Amino acid sequence: KLVACHPGAFRSGRWTCCLQAERSAAGCSRTHSAITLGDWSDPLDPDAEAQAVYRQLLLGRDQLRLKLLEDSSLDTEVDPGRDSSATDGPCAEVLAQQRAATTHLLQVLEDLEQAHEEFQKRG
């Protein structure tokens, strides 16, 4: 068992708890037997968490676009044996809400991407 540990995380080239720049630096907090792994947690790094969410959204962007196109093609398909008023029910309403949410999310992603590019140009 180690005598000391870092209660923070090593991010951006330094420990978040004591700001030491070496990953192999000795721990800054004494360890004891009373703490269990379930009690331990990293302090959140909002920038890192936002970057992780942004990356996941970018990875799923193409799937969102495909889903939006599929949903749109369902509206244009005409079934001759089906009453056109049958599409005016709750399913059509849910589909419209999903399409609106997907469209909004894709727009937010586009705005985030533009903001990210502008930020990189300034740096």
Image (cartoon, rainbow, N blue to C red):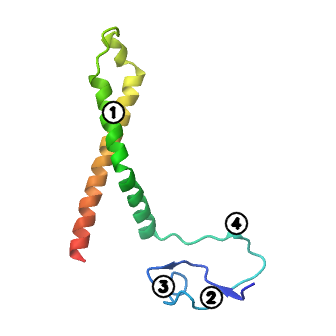
Q: Is residue 105 left or right of residue 40?
A: left
Q: Using the image, tell me which numbered label, if any, was put on residue 27.
A: 2
Q: Nearer the viewer, mark 1 or mark 3?
A: 1
Q: Which quadrant of the figure contains the C terminus?
A: bottom left
Measured in 3D between alpha carbons, the distance from the residue under mark 4 to the one under mark 3, in whole angstroms, is: 24 Å
Residue 2, compared with residue 123, is above or below; it is below
**Secondary structure of the residue carrying numbered label 1:** helix
Query: N-terminal of the two: label 1 or label 3?
Result: 3
Q: Using the image, tell me which numbered label, if any, was put on residue 49.
A: none
Query: N-terminal of the two: label 2 or label 4?
Result: 2
Query: N-terminal of the two: label 4 or label 3?
Result: 3
**Secondary structure of the residue carrying numbered label 3:** strand
Q: Which residue occupies the extreme right position in the image?
A: 33
Q: Quadrant of residue 80?
A: top left
Q: Position of residue 16 (x, y in %)?
A: 51, 81
The amino acid at mark 2 is Gly
Q: Which residue is mark 4?
A: 38
- The residue drawn where x is 47% and y is 71% is 45
Within 10 angstroms of label 4, few (less than 14), some, or many (20 or more) residues?
few
Q: Using the image, tell me which numbered label, if any, was put on residue 14.
A: 3
- The residue drawn where x is 31% and y is 44% is 104
Measured in 3D between alpha carbons, the distance from the residue under mark 1 to the one under mark 2, in whole angstroms, is: 54 Å
Residue 93, compared with residue 53, is above or below; it is above
Tag 3 near tag 2, CB within 8 Å? no
Q: Position of residue 49 (x, y in %)?
A: 45, 65
The amino acid at mark 3 is Arg
Q: Position of residue 86 (x, y in %)?
A: 37, 14
Q: Quadrant of residue 73?
A: top left
Q: Position of residue 92 (x, y in %)?
A: 37, 24
Query: N-terminal of the two: label 1 or label 2?
Result: 2
Q: Which residue is mark 1?
A: 70
